[in-house]
C-alpha cells in the first residue's frame, strides 16, 4: 500500500488507499467510515513464454503474481486460475527479473498469447551452466555462450560492462594486439569473427583504433557467442559469431542515465511513450582534453609508437618543429519499438559510429619551412527495419523479417601545404540485405526453423595523388542468396539435446555454391555431468587486408575486400570439438578439445613484416587446442581460472619451408581472477599470463644482401623466434549508492596493468641508411602501460 501524501484531505487520502490496496472506504458521517474488502473479480489467464532471439519456448520460468507462482512447461506454457484481473504478473528466468505484464493483457485474445522475453541465455529449454566464470555468463544446450549485460558482475580492468572485453574472459577468445574490438577466436584473425548488432553486420567495431568498443554498454542487453556448431541462420565468420541485442521490452517507467570517465561522456534513455511504443536513445563522445589524462596518453602512445608522430624528434635537420594532434570519436543510436498488436512487433534501429584523427606538423628552419596536414576518418552507419509476428497457439509459428543497410567508410589524406601536394585513399563498404525466417514448434521436444537471406555488398577502393595527377578507383560487388534450415530436438526425457542445421549459399555472378552442415549435441549423463560434440563447415567472402605501406603516419590500418579472385579466395573452414562440463556445489568445470582448419588465406593479407611482406601465396592454417575453465562461487566471492593451449601453424605449398608458426600462435594462456562483494562495494583482481607471439629474425652472419642493386634484409625462416612471455595484473572496484527513490549513483575504478609491465606484442626489423651505411634496426611494439580509469554514473 502506498502511503498517502500528508497534504491530502480525508477524502483524497481514502481514494489513494482504496486505489493502492484491497479495501473499500465509505464515509458515513464525519467521524465514521465503513471499511469493506473489495470484491475482486477473479479470472483465468494463460500465456506462452517465447525467447525473442531464437523463437524457442522457455521452460522453468517463474511467473509471479500477488499470491500465486506458476512455472512454464517445456513448451513455454503457463496458466493462472482465479487471479485478479488488475494484478501484475512478474516474469523471472533463471532467477533474474525479465519483465512484468498485466493479467488483463493475457486475456485480450481468445487464445493464450505469446509473451516475448529478450534473454539470450534462455535459447533452449535447458541452460547447462549458469554464472559460468562470473555472474551473467551462461552456457546453453545449443552450444552458445550467452552474456546478460543487466546481470553482469565486475571483471578486472573494466569500468563498464563492455561486451567485447567481457568476451575476452572466455577461454579461446583473446586480443593479440590488446584491443577491445579486435578479437581472435581459436587462432583466427579478428575479421574472421562476425559481429552483429541487432542482426546487422558491423564493419567497424571500435573507437581509438580498436582500444575502445564502439558499442555503448548501456544499450547492449544480451550477447550470444558461438565458437563452433553455429546456428545455420548465421553465415560468414569462419572463426566465430557474436550477436549483440538491444532492448526489446517496454519498461513501465522511463529509465536512463548519464556517465563520464577519462575517455568519454555518455547518456541514454529508454522512453516508454505508451504501453505499446518504446523509444530508446543513446550517445557517447570522446574526452581527450584533460590535462595529464592518463588513459588518453597511454592510448595515444600505444597507437602511435614507432610512427611518424612519436619519432619526429629523430629528424636531424636543424629547425623548430611543432605538432598538433586531436582525436575524437562519438556514437549515436536510436531504436523505436512498436507493438502494433499482441501478435505483431515492428522496430527501427539506427547506429552511427564516427572516429576522426587530425595531425598537423609545422617545421620552420632558416632556409626552409613546411606544413603537413594529415587526417583519418572512419564511419559506420547501420539502420534496419524488422517485423516479428506470432501466428497463434493453434498455429505455433513465429516469423521474422529484417531489411537493413550497413555503410562503412575509411578516408585518409595528407596535404603538404607548401608544395601543394595532396594524397588520399579510401575504403568503403556498402551492404544491403534482407533476412527472414520462420520457426514452427512441433511439440515440446522439437522446433524447426527455416529462412532466407539476401546480401548485396559493394566495396569501393579509391586513391588520389596530385603529384602524379592520378586518380585510381575500383568498385567490386558480391551478392548472394542463402537458404537455411535447422531443428532443435530434446530427446530421451530431455537428456539428449540436438541442434542441427544446413545452410546453402549461392553466388550467382561467380557460379559458386556452398553447402554447410552445423551440429551441436549435448548429452546429459546426470545432474552434474554433460558431454558435448560440435562440428561445422563455414565460408567467408568478405574479409580484411592489412595496410603496411600505404597508411597514414605509419599507423597500421585494414581494408575490407571481396573474395572471388585468384589471390583473394573464399575462406573455407571446418571445425570439430568435443567437451565435458561438470557442475556441483557451486563448482563449475568445463573443458573442450578442438581441431580447426581455414583454407584460402593469402600472405598479402596477413600483415607479415618479413620476407613475405610483398608476396601473394595462397595457403591455409591449422589449429588444435584445449580450453579449460574452473570456477568456485562462495557467498560473497567468486574465483575462476582458465587455461588455453593452442598449436597454430600456416601451410603454404609454394613457400619453403611449407609449414611454419602462425602469426597468432601463442601456445599457452592462463588467467586467474576473483571478485568479492561487500555491501555496496565490489572488487575484482585478475592476472593473465601468455607465451609470446612468433617473429622473424635476420640471418646471423649474412643479415643484409643486395637484390637488383638494392640492399634488403636476409631473413631466417618465417616466425623462427618467440617474444618474451606476457604477464599483466588488472584491478577494478565499484560502489553503488541509492541517492533517493529516483536516482542511483555508481562509481567505478579500474587499473589496467597494475605493475606497469612492458609486454612486447610485436617485433620486426627495418633497414635504415645511417651515415651512408645500410643498418638493421629492431622495432618493438609494446602493450599499454599502467592505465588507471574512473567513471561516475547517475542512473534513474
Image (cartoon, helix red, strand yellow):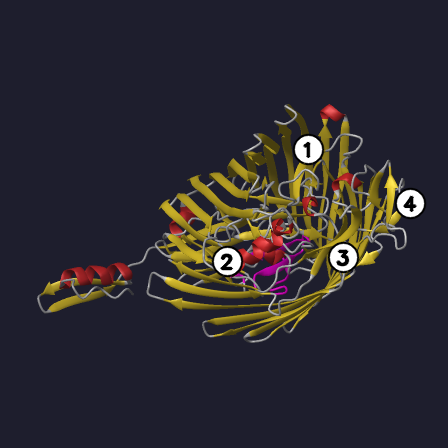
Determine which residue is flagged by label 4: 656
Quadrant in which the C terminus is drawn: bottom left
Which of the pair 324/317 is nearer the observer?
317
> Which residue is at a point 46% across and 48% down the rendered structure image?
285
Structural distance between the alpha carbons of marks 3 and 1: 38 Å
Q: Nearer the viewer, mark 2 or mark 4?
A: 4
Comparing 298 with 46, the one in front is 298
Mark 4 or mark 1, earlier in chain: 1
Nearest to the observer: residue 692 or residue 375: 375
* Rendered image: mark on residue 150: 2
Query: Which is more N-terminal, label 1 or label 2?
Result: 2
User: Secondary structure beneath disc 3?
Assistant: loop
| Residue topped by disc 1 | 482
Marks 2 and 3 sit apart, C-alpha to C-alpha, by 36 Å
Q: Callout 3: few (<14), some (14-19), or many (20+) C-alpha neighbours within 10 Å?
A: many
Element type at marker 4? Answer: loop
Give the magenta range: 126-152
The correct choice, above or below, for 14 with respect to 117 in the image is below
149 in magenta: yes
739 relative to 685 in the view: left or right:
left
Q: Position of residue 723 (x, y in %)?
A: 77, 60
Residue at 55% in and 66% down: 751
- Residue at image mark 3: 693
Q: Which tag, 2 or 4, sits closer to the chain's start?
A: 2
Amino acid at each position: 500500500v502506498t502511503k498517502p501524501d500528508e497534504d491530502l484531505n480525508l477524502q483524497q487520502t481514502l481514494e489513494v488507499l482504496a486505489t493502492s490496496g484491497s479495501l473499500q472506504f465509505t464515509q458515513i458521517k464525519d467521524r465514521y467510515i465503513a471499511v469493506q474488502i473489495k470484491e475482486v473479480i477473479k479470472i483465468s489467464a494463460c500465456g506462452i513464454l517465447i525467447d525473442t532471439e531464437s523463437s524457442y519456448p522457455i521452460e522453468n520460468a517463474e511467473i509471479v503474481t500477488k499470491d500465486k507462482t506458476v512455472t512454464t512447461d517445456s513448451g513455454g506454457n503457463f496458466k493462472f486460475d482465479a487471479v485478479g484481473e488488475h494484478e501484475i504478473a512478474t516474469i523471472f528466468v533463471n532467477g533474474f527479473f525479465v519483465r512484468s505484464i498485466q493479467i488483463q493483457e493475457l486475456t485480450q485474445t481468445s487464445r493464450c498469447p505469446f509473451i516475448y522475453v529478450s534473454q539470450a541465455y534462455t535459447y533452449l529449454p535447458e541452460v547447462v551452466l549458469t554464472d559460468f566464470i562470473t555472474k551473467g555468463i551462461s552456457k546453453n544446450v545449443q552450444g552458445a555462450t550467452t552474456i546478460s549485460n543487466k546481470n553482469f558482475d565486475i571483471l578486472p580492468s573494466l569500468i563498464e560492462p563492455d561486451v567485447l572485453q567481457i568476451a575476452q574472459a572466455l577461454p579461446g577468445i583473446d586480443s593479440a594486439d590488446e584491443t577491445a574490438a579486435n578479437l581472435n577466436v581459436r587462432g583466427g584473425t579478428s575479421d574472421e569473427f562476425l559481429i552483429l548488432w541487432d542482426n546487422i553486420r558491423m564493419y567497424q567495431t571500435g573507437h581509438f583504433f580498436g582500444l575502445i568498443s564502439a558499442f555503448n554498454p548501456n544499450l547492449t542487453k544480451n550477447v550470444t557467442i558461438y565458437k563452433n556448431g553455429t546456428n545455420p541462420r548465421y553465415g560468414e565468420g569462419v572463426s566465430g559469431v557474436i550477436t549483440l541485442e538491444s532492448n526489446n521490452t517496454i519498461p513501465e517507467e522511463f529509465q536512463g542515465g548519464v556517465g563520464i570517465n577519462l575517455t568519454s561522456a555518455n547518456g541514454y534513455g529508454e522512453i516508454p511513450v505508451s504501453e505499446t511504443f518504446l523509444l530508446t536513445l543513446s550517445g557517447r563522445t570522446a574526452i581527450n582534453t584533460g590535462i595529464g589524462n592518463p588513459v588518453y596518453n597511454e592510448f595515444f602512445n600505444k597507437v602511435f609508437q614507432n610512427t611518424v608522430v612519436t619519432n619526429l624528434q629523430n629528424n636531424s635537420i636543424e629547425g623548430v618543429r611543432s605538432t598538433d594532434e586531436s582525436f575524437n570519436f562519438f556514437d549515436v543510436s536510436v531504436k523505436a519499438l512498436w507493438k502494433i498488436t499482441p501478435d505483431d512487433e515492428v522496430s527501427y534501429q539506427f547506429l552511427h559510429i564516427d572516429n576522426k584523427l587530425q595531425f598537423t606538423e609545422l617545421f620552420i628552419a632558416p632556409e626552409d619551412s613546411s606544413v603537413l596536414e594529415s587526417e583519418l576518418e572512419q564511419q559506420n552507419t547501420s539502420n534496419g527495419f524488422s517485423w516479428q509476428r506470432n501466428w497463434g497457439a493453434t498455429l505455433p509459428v513465429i516469423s521474422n523479417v529484417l531489411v537493413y543497410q550497413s555503410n562503412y567508410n575509411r578516408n585518409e589524406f595528407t596535404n603538404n601545404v607548401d608544395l601543394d601536394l595532396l594524397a588520399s585513399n579510401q575504403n568503403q563498404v556498402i551492404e544491403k540485405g534482407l533476412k527472414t525466417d520462420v520457426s514452427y514448434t512441433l511439440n515440446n521436444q522439437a522446433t524447426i526453423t527455416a529462412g532466407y537471406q539476401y546480401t548485396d555488398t559493394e566495396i569501393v577502393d579509391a586513391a588520389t595523388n596530385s603529384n602524379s595527377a592520378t586518380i585510381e578507383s575500383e568498385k567490386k560487388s558480391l551478392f548472394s542468396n542463402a537458404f537455411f534450415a535447422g531443428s532443435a530436438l530434446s530427446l530421451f526425457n530431455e537428456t539428449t539435446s540436438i541442434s542441427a542445421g544446413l545452410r546453402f549459399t549461392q553466388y550467382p555472378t561467380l557460379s559458386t555454391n556452398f553447402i554447410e552442415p552445423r551440429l551441436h549435441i549435448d548429452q546429459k549423463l546426470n545432474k552434474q555431468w554433460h558431454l558435448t560434440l560440435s562440428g561445422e563447415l563455414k565460408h567467408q567472402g568478405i574479409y580484411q587486408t592489412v595496410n603496411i605501406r600505404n597508411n597514414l603516419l605509419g599507423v597500421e590500418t585494414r581494408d575490407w575486400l571481396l573474395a572471388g579472385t585468384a589471390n583473394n579466395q573464399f575462406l573455407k573452414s571446418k571445425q570439430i570439438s568435443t567437451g565435458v562440463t561438470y557442475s556441483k556445489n557451486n563448482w563449475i568445470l568445463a573443458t573442450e578439445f578442438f581441431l580447426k582448419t581455414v583454407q584460402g588465406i593469402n600472405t598479402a593479407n596477413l600483415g607479415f613484416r618479413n620476407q613475405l611482406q610483398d608476396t601473394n601465396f595462397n595457403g591455409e592454417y591449422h589449429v588444435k587446442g584445449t580450453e579449460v575453465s574452473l570456477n568456485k562461487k562462495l557467498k560473497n566471492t567468486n574465483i575462476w581460472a582458465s587455461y588455453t593451449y593452442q598449436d597454430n601453424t600456416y601451410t603454404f605449398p609454394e613457400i619453403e619451408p611449407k609449414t611454419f608458426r602462425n602469426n597468432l600462435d601463442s601456445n599457452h594462456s592462463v588467467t586467474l581472477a576473483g571478485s568479492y562483494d561487500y555491501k555496496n562495494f565490489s572488487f575484482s583482481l585478475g592476472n593473465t599470463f601468455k607465451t609470446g607471439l612468433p617473429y622473424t629474425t635476420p640471418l646471423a652472419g649474412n643479415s643484409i644482401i643486395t637484390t637488383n642493386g638494392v640492399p634488403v634484409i636476409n631473413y631466417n625462416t618465417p616466425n623462427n623466434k618467440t617474444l618474451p612471455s606476457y604477464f599483466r595484473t588488472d584491478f577494478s572496484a565499484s560502489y553503488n549508492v541509492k541517492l533517493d527513490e529516483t536516482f542511483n549513483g555508481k562509481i567505478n575504478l579500474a587499473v589496467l596493468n597494475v605493475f606497469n609491465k612492458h609486454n612486447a606484442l610485436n617485433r620486426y626489423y627495418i633497414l635504415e641508411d645511417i651515415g651512408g651505411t645500410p643498418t638493421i634496426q629492431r622495432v618493438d611494439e609494446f602493450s599499454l602501460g599502467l592505465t588507471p580509469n574512473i567513471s561516475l554514473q547517475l542512473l534513474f
